[in-house]
Amino acid sequence: MRSCASPRAMSAGARVLCFATQGHRHTDGERIRVLLEPLAAEEFAFDHAHKLRSALALFRAVLAKRPALVVMEGTGTAGGFVLLAIHALLGTPYVVSSGDAVGPFLRLHSRALGVLGAIYERALYRSCAGFVGWTPYLTGRALTLGAARAMTAPGWTREMPSSGARERVRAELGVPAETIVVGLVGTLNWNATVGYVYGAEIVQAIRRIARADVVACIVGDGDGRARLEQLAGDELGRRVLLPGRVPPEQVPDYLAAFDVATLSQSVDRLGSFRYTTKLSEYLAAQLPVIAGEVPAAYDLDEGNFWRLPGGAPWSPRQIDALVELLQGISRQEIARRRSAASASRSAMFERTAQQRRMRAFVDDLLEASAQAGGGPTRLA
């Protein structure tokens, strides 16, 4: 176990136990630690590589510590079934924080998994004390599925670019100063169901336009990277750059080297609920964003978004629209939309604001739980 604040703060009030189903070293683990930092939450080091063992250890930890509240980042069943069990057996309240719609996500793998995922998702939310959505759309979905209370915490920028990052990264990539870089940062996993990996539409569009002064830079790694290399063909290393995974603290440096970012989300029951984990960093880097017609591309647009028709980044219509956009895009238009991006920075994506809202949310949940069961109330 590790504490997110000092032992003195821990002893000042009711205890909160947190964990991330993707593992404490994952960015999800960092997210929940930072959100709960003002609350002196104690972290259980969940091991995603040994989920069953971790689930049993988590159950024993709750039995031993009897926390006033357990907060789970993610919706993995190994952690979720523990929460359902401790709620049923001990009456322990819990909070779920999630960036995905569970049923639609699992349906990508099979219809049967989608049905089971929907049942699990509804049970998890109907029994929770509260839900924290990465987007307001997920927050509304959780309320619809039965969550008693909910709030939104969409993420924040973890680092700022280092001095001279734009020039240095472009030099490393071999990109001239006047070249327009269209970029994406993410995990490059291959989705066999739809035949897609993040960035595939950018690579296809780059190969179809005649301009030599527009290049794609897709930062990340995964089993789909080889597919991107195949799509790039002889443009790999020239107009298609795949630098691989970079340490999280270096991501802002690569964003500084971009001119335009892309948001590769489908307009469906999965993609429409998402922002993407990097959206807060795209906006903080003052990058205009190319997206599909997802809700975020309307709700967050202050003149800094392009919206493409087509419904999904792998659809021919959206790829055709992207080709047309990149063929005609100008530095003047990018500068205008970048100026709009700079003016539209929202407190919604500020870390301290989200921490403040999270503390208020947990305090209220603890008070409600205390009134119902006579336990300890607010944290000091």
Image (cartoon, grey):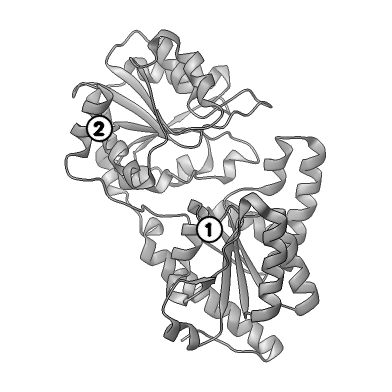
As drawn, which residue projects farthest toward the bottom? Answer: 374
The amino acid type found where label 2 is placed reads: Val
Circle 1 sits on which residue? 24
Which residue sits at x=57%, y=28%? 312
Which residue sits at x=73%, y=54%? 121
Q: Earlier in the sequence, mark 2 or mark 1?
A: 1
x and y percentages locating residue 319 in the rendered image: 50, 19
Circle 2 sits on which residue? 169
Residue closest to the eye, 308 or 89 = 89
Q: Label 1 neighbourhood size at 10 Å, few (<14), some (14-19), many (20+)?
A: many
* Vertical side of 31 occupied by 232: above or below: above
Which residue sits at x=54%, y=70%? 1
- Residue 78 seen in render: yes
* Vertical side of 274 occupied by 55: above or below: below
Picture quarter containing residue 315? top right
The amino acid type found where label 1 is placed reads: His
Picture quarter containing residue 70? bottom right
